[in-house]
Each structure stands twice: as structure tokens, then as C-alpha cells.
Amino acid sequence: MVDGKTNPGKSRWFALLGPAFVASVAYLDPGNVAVNISAGAHYGYLLVWVLVLSNAIAVYVQYQSAKLGIVTGQSLPEILGERLSPWPRRAYWLQAELVIAATEIAEVIGGAIALNLLFGLPLALGGFIVGVVSILILSIHSRHGQRTFEVVIVGFLAVIAIGFLAGLFVSPVNWSAAASGLVPRFEGAQTVLLAAGMLGATVMPHAIYVHSTLARDRHGKAIDQSQLRRLMRATRLDVVGALAIAGSVNIAMLLLAAASLMGSENTDTIEGAFDAIQVNLGPAIAVIFAIGLLASGFASTAVGSHAGSAIMDGLLTIRVPVLLRRLVTLIPAIVILAIGIDPTQALVLSQVFLSLGIPFALVPLLRFTSNEQVMLGHHDKTWVRVLGYLVATLVISLNLALLLLTFL
């Protein structure tokens, strides 16, 4: 089944695409904007290789998540929920819920900053508006189904891409220097910290959870081998296409900052980066950038709420309406904005907190896709399994470095 109705044997390939494009929004949220702009403004093209590597890892991880959902007909949280005894399952849910809360806080804050830059709205009011818009986006899923929801999110993705790519058309990128940035290297502890932050902002726990859910809901469980092969080919195309766009936009942000913002003051904050873009590239490019940031906040907070609902449903078998959940999780973000905590600092701290949740999502995913019983004979081959654990070791090591460098 495809979207509950369509026989994939008679569908065109493009009709099978979509879940990865929704999941890819997680790779273009306000946390990514902050860390990519900061890396380019401070160190030029030095860390281009980190984004290329991060995107390659993301392709691997997201394909594994989608494959799990298609082959088993279950999401990662559901499979975990079945295999954990009650108290470990509740503890696991708690850490996942805290990670999702940190994600949603970051996304609401990013949207609020964009509304402040565009219209001068107070941050708390902006956060409330972002929450309301995300509820409207989520209502599309509940009323009109996943396919319509995917189309809306892809529309936001297009706005995000335009917003963050526009500056490159007027920015004098040094392409030879950018090519040299493909050579892996660091220049001091701060570049290691930034690299870990860039990787952590790319391989995010909620994107791992939600992609298995999206693939399950969109395709259901493959009922025969020919159907499974077709879905897997379409899924590879979906993942590679979606993350090629997301990766290109992330790299474009770093190139823009390296070409036009290097040496500018206050580029450690999104507001400072906006001011620097306005000075160096003109007010029109700055406004387009802020619109892209706003679209990022709207779309990513809706996807984050969808992920949170899937986690609660899978681990606790409690179906809380996703719109109600959005209202509840909106409160912490608005409180943070209302009491005057620096929004960019809150964004950075949320990314650090997210890094704690990556092993809890990534390691079980790789264990399940390697398990012959779980995958019904479609488990990972040995080389895929080895690659997966190399990826997990790299991601976890860099996130440990991020935590140590942040607190020390």
C-alpha cells in the first residue's frame, strides 16, 4: 500500500517520493543556521568538509530509518516499545521527550527571531505566532492526510532554500578556497567545537525517529518482494534527492558567511548575522534570508511536533492529539523568550542538549536494521553493518567532544 490507497506497482516513481523531504527539514532548522553562519564567518571555508561528511552520514542514517519503517511496517519507537520492559521503556521515553522538547524550543525561538527581524515583533509574541502557524500546518496532516502535508512541507522547503541560497548570487565566493575546504583539518579547539556542533545539528534524534514513522505511514509494510524492491529504490531516490537539497543549502550558508561575513562583528548571533548581511549584501538579501529563517521555524517546529507525537505513541502507546501536544510544548519556548534569555544562546544550548539524545536513537536503529528477525531477512549486509557502527562511533565521539568543550 502507498498512502493507504495506491498500488506501488502501478504508481509512477514520483508518487512514492515525499517522506525524506519532510524529514530533511530537520537539517535546515534554526540551529543549523546559527552554527553554519558562525563557522563561515569565523573560519572561512575551513569546515566545508564537515558539512559534506555530515550530509553523507545523514543519507546513510535516514535511509536506514526509512528502510526499517517499510520492511517492518513499524516505526523505530514502536519497535523499541515492544522490546523494552515497562520501566526502561518509560525512562527511554523520558529522555526522548526531553530531546524533542529541546528541538521544539530551538525551532520556535528561530522563528521568533525571524519575526523580530522582519517586523520588530517582541520575541514572546513571535514565538506564540510560530506555535499557532505550526498548529495550522499540523492540522493539514490530520485533516487531509500525509501526502498533502508533504506537499506543504516541500513548499516551505523551497522557500527555505531560496532564502538561504539567494545571497550566493551576489556574494563573491572564492571557489578555489572553498574547494580547499574539502580537505579535513582543524585549527584549534574552537573549530573542533564548531565541527561537532555542525554534525550534531545535522544528525538529529527526532529526524531518525520521524523518518521511520513517515515511511510506515506513507507506504505501509511491503507485502511482496517486488513491491519491497520498488519501494527501496524509490526511497533511495527520495533520501538522496532530499538531502542533496538540504546539504547544498547548509553548505551555501557557510559559503555565504565565509565570502561576505568573515571579520564582521557579532556573527555569533543570528541577529548579528542578519545585520552583517544587510551591511555587506544589502537589505533585500537580508530580508530574503530572514524569510528563509521564518519558513525554517514554521516547518521544522511542525515536523518536530509530529516526531514527538510518534515517540509518545510508540513508546507509551498513548495517543495524545498532536495539536494538543504542540500547545503544551509551546509553553517552555515562550517562557524562555518572555523572561529575556538570550535567544541565540538558548539555541546553542539546545543543540548541545540534543547531542545527548543521538546515541539513544542511532544505536538502536543500527541494531534493528542488522537484526535478521526484525528485518524479516532484509537485514544489513556485513559491510553495511560495519559502516553503520563506524558512523555511530564518529557521531558519538564528536558529540562527546562537543559536550566536553562546551562545559570545560
Image (tube, helix red, strand yellow):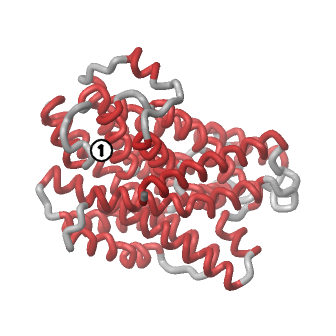
Classify residue 59 by image quadrant.
top right
Secondary structure beneath disc 1? helix
Classify residue 107 by image quadrant.
bottom left
Describe residue 281's horizontal placement relative to residue 14 as left or right. left
Considering depth in this image, is 76 or 53 the residue closer to the camera? 53
- Kindly give the residue lying farthest to the bottom in the view shown: 86
Residue 406 visible in the picture: yes
Point out the image quarter for the N terminus: bottom right
- Residue at screen point 59% across, 37% down: 56
Q: Amino acid type of disc 1? A: Gly
404 to 252, vertically: above or below: below
Point out the image quarter for the C terminus: bottom left
382 to 264, vertically: above or below: below
What residue does disc 1 label?
A: 292
Classify residue 301 by image quadrant.
bottom left
What x and y, as percent, mark residue 312?
Answer: 57, 75
Q: Residues within 10 Å of mark 1 (few under 14, many from 20)?
A: many
Describe residue 110's horizontal placement relative to residue 359 as left or right. left
Describe residue 6's horizontal placement relative to residue 369 as left or right. left
- Residue at screen point 51% across, 62% down: 145
- Residue at screen point 46% across, 50% down: 201
What x and y, as percent, mark residue 16?
Answer: 62, 45
What x and y, as percent, mark residue 150?
Answer: 49, 52
Residue 3 visible in the picture: no
